[in-house]
Structure formats: structure tokens, C-alpha cells
Amino acid sequence: MRKALIQEICEKEYTLFQKVRNEGTRAACQDRRDTFFIMRSAQFQVWSTESLASWRQDLEDAVAKGRNPLADKYGYMMASTYPEGYEGIRRFLPEVGKEKQRLAEQYLRQYLKWAEESQLAHPHFRGQGRPLYTVQDTEEKTSLETYLRGELYTYSEATLKKLLQDCEKAREAGCNLVMEIDDATARAYGYPSAGDYV
């Protein structure tokens, strides 16, 4: 059931991803379906079934309203990576209320803490990815913090609350969800774990 749900969500996201336009052009990553599914599936593997179902509902609700959450995500990211461009599009993006901002920042704090630990444990693997912090953003490279914040702003408050519950359960169990995501990603590329990537 979970595998089918993750596959369904990835299919919905990829369909929306195909409609995203980068200043009127198509980005190269939009033609890398396998990479898209590997990255998204790895993330979703650490989510609870409740969080997955909630995000699927968010996607369906957004489409019903004529919105593309994946396009919105990149729009929100521009607040840090391309402020001048963001000012030109911000009126077209759904407003992010204070409660959603609070929930998103709470999730971000824990996620970045886990990412810091993963970077120390797996420097070679993590070195292939994004820089961690918004202060490291450039027009060419977007940090994990900025990317994830943009994505979180496209989630409903209900989904964010469920994800925070997932975080709490992981903390109580002594788990690092970012390390689990990294390991799932590494396995998809043929490595036993992120620690085996050199």
C-alpha cells in the first residue's frame, strides 16, 4: 500500500513538474525522470502513511484549484535566490500565513539539524548535493534550507502537522530521517549506504 501510494504521489508530482517553466524555458532536470523518482521516493520512504495521504490530498486540492505546487515551490525559493524576480511574481503565489510559516520553520530546524549530522557522517555523499543554508544561496545554486522552505510552503497545515509528528517519533526513537533518506538514495544508485559513497 505504501509503495503504491509513494508511486502515485511521484507520478502526480512528475506530471506537474513537466509544466514548470524556468523563465520560459525547460530545465534539463525535467528530462531526468529516473533521478526525479529516486530523489522523491527516498524522501517519501521516511514519511508516515498519514503524511503521504495528506500530501496526496494537497496535490489533488491544488490541481482542482488550478495551481501547480511544484511551480509555486520554485516561486517561493526565488525570495532568496532571485529577490528581484520574486517581487515580480509574489502576487501570483498563494499567501503563506503565519501559522504555516511557524510550522515550516519548526520542521526546518529539525531537518537541518539532521542534515548537519549527516554531512559530518557522510561528507563525500553530502558533498554532491546542495549547500545547507540560505545564506549560501546564489542565482546558480539553491541551498537545502531554501529549497525545503519553498516546498514546505506548498504543503497544507494539516500535512505539516503530520510531518512534525513524524519528526517527533523519529527523535524519540533516536533516528535521523535525513540519514535514512540519504541511505535510500545511495541504495537506489547501487551503494549499500550513503557511507559507502566515495
Image: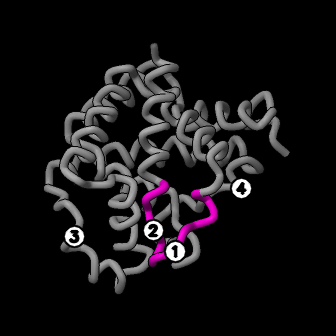
Question: For mark 3, does the 10 Å Cα neighbourhood hold few (<14), some (14 to 19), or many (20 or more) residues?
Answer: few
Question: For mark 1, does the 10 Å Cα neighbourhood hold few (<14), some (14 to 19), or many (20 or more) residues?
Answer: few
Counting from the top left corner in percent of width and height, residue 134 is at 45, 66
Q: How are the residues colored? A: one colour
Earlier in the chain: of badge 1 and badge 4, it is 1
Res 163 quadrant in image = top left
Q: Nearer the viewer, mark 4 or mark 3?
A: 3
Asked whether 28 falls inside the magenta stretch, the response is: yes
Tell me the element at label 1. Answer: loop
For marks 1 and 3, give the CA distance: 19 Å
What residue do we see at 52% from left, 20% from top?
3
The residue identified by callout 3 is 92
The reply to whether the C-beta atoms of the residues labelled 1 and 3 are less than 8 Å apart is no
The residue identified by callout 1 is 25
For marks 2 and 4, give the CA distance: 25 Å
The reply to whether the C-beta atoms of the residues labelled 4 and 3 are less than 8 Å apart is no
- Amino acid of disc 2: Arg
Q: Which residues are magenta?
A: 18-30
The answer to whether one can see residue 84 in this image is yes
114 to the left or right of 171: right
* Residue 52 sits above or below residue 31 on the image: above
Earlier in the chain: of badge 2 and badge 4, it is 2
Question: For mark 2, does the 10 Å Cα neighbourhood hold few (<14), some (14 to 19), or many (20 or more) residues?
Answer: few
Quadrant (top left, top right, bottom left, bottom right) of the N terminus = top left
> Observer-nearest residue: 54 or 21?
21
The residue identified by callout 2 is 21
Q: Nearer the viewer, mark 2 or mark 3?
A: 2
Tell me the element at label 4. Answer: loop
Asked whether 93 falls inside the magenta stretch, the response is: no
The reply to whether the C-beta atoms of the residues labelled 2 and 1 are less than 8 Å apart is yes
